[in-house]
Amino acid sequence: MWNQQKLNTYQGALFNKVSQLIEYYIEQGILIAGEQLPSERELANILNINRTTVVRALDNLSERGLLIRRQGSGTFVNDKKWGVQAHTTINWRLPARFYQNKQSRYQQKVELIRRQQTNIIDLANGDLPTIWMPKLLLPNISSDELIMHEKNSDQLQLGLPTLKTQIANYMQQRFAMSVDTSQILITSGTQQSLFLITQGLLKPGDAIAIESPSYFYSLPLFQAAGLRLYGIECDNEGITLDSLRKVVSQQPIKWLFLNPIFQNPLGFVMSDKRKKAILAFCRSQCIGIVEDDAYSGLAFNSQLSISPIKKFDHHNQVIYLGSLSKYIGRNIRVGWMIAPRNIIENLADIRQHIDSGLSILPQLLAEEYLKNHYVTHQRFLSEQLNLKANQLMKWLNDYFGHLLNYQKPLGGFHLYAQLSVKSSQQEIAILNQLLAQNIIVSPGSDYGDKFGWIRLSYGHFN
């Protein structure tokens, strides 16, 4: 594995070449999480370089959080990337294969099967199945009116007023929340909302906290913004206050990003008591909260409390992100942000300079959905997803037996399960075994978790 020929393919100072070589081996899965590297002396001898150069390279990677150096024990691949100083990854001159090389070997196999096979069970796919998408009709609007809307898009940079009214009605009917339409910004989905927040409210090097594990962990936009991510431990009610206190006492956390209702991937629902406690603590520490609500309309039990944290926010410290992608499909990209008016106006101005605002057509379809369809359609989706979840659990019990542990899903799209394995090699063996049967799952490492965990999206279980 360690050879000078590979080392010489990199550019820059010699210590930087060594850093790039080790980083490449980690990205390719050749060096796995928790694995110990050869000693400094051994690496120097293998690569035929000075030991001082090796030390400098290892120190560089340790500072970035990719390696952990333990006095008297050696150097190890970090089994989590929390706190890593993420370097900007946007570079338009890079060839397409750069992004392919960033994938693990398992991910590369998955992409190959997706391209070559048609009869697959893709339990890593968290999108809404196309057969469940509602059949939406545009309102009675002429092409001239549509063109006029598009021409006036500069005046509508906060979003279509009639859609904002429907969103305010939706929040009132579903959560008994009173929302001023002047505090609503229409976006093209949660990803755009998060991008605007990273551009307008954060700067490179800032520390943010997220649930551990969390889908936020895998988002490249946080890496592109150069943010430091710190994981907060969770129990079956969400992040724990003790873990949050500990991280905040050690790091200058600016924002806390949460997905509290049917969290991705864990699936928990944060209790109202926990929401209020987290909110009070963050207020005492001047920490803002970004709340992503993607699944709250998909509860399997109508008695379950699905109120957002934003409902308990009386001091404008929570930015609420809503989206319709899990209800009407990802192609009609419409979401919304609820925040103080000055914030959404600033973020809308940033967007206007980047992509010239929003298209009217998706907003009209979203308005139609919220006005005429969401009650019956979301009930239908909940019933179908509950049925699929029960079918998946039966299959898991038959296939894995006592070798798999999980909590029964309460709603949403995902089931998170723990394999009875003792090493990442055993985990990979099981993933490959499933892959050989054209069954694709998401490993927990995609969400910042340790080995042995997998996420299964039961909407696509067959």
Image (cartoon, grey):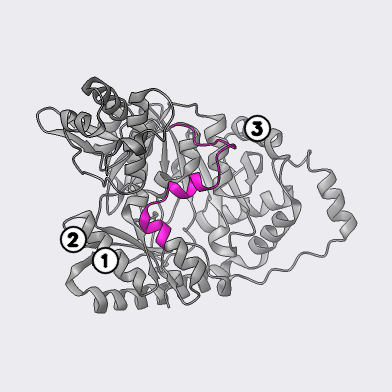
Under circle 2, the secondary element is loop
Q: Is residue 47 left or right of residue 10?
A: left
The answer for how far apart the CA atoms under marks 3 and 2 are is 47 Å
Residue 430 badge: 1
First-in-chain label (3 vs 2) = 3
Query: What is the span of residues highlighted in magenta in the rendered image?
Result: 87-109
The answer for how far apart the CA atoms under marks 3 and 1 are is 46 Å
State which quarter of the image contains the C terminus: bottom left
Q: Position of residue 105 (x, y in %)?
A: 36, 55
Asked if labels 1 and 2 touch by Cβ distance under 8 angstroms, the answer is yes
Residue at (76%, 65%) from the top-left corner? Answer: 138
First-in-chain label (3 vs 1) = 3
Q: Nearer the viewer, mark 3 or mark 2?
A: 2
Three-letter amino acid code at the position of disc 1: Ile
Residue farthest top in this picture: 52
First-in-chain label (2 vs 1) = 2
Image position of 36 with respect to 126: above or below: above
Does the stretch in magenta take in 94?
yes
The answer for how far apart the CA atoms under marks 2 and 1 are is 9 Å
Q: Nearer the viewer, mark 2 or mark 1?
A: 1
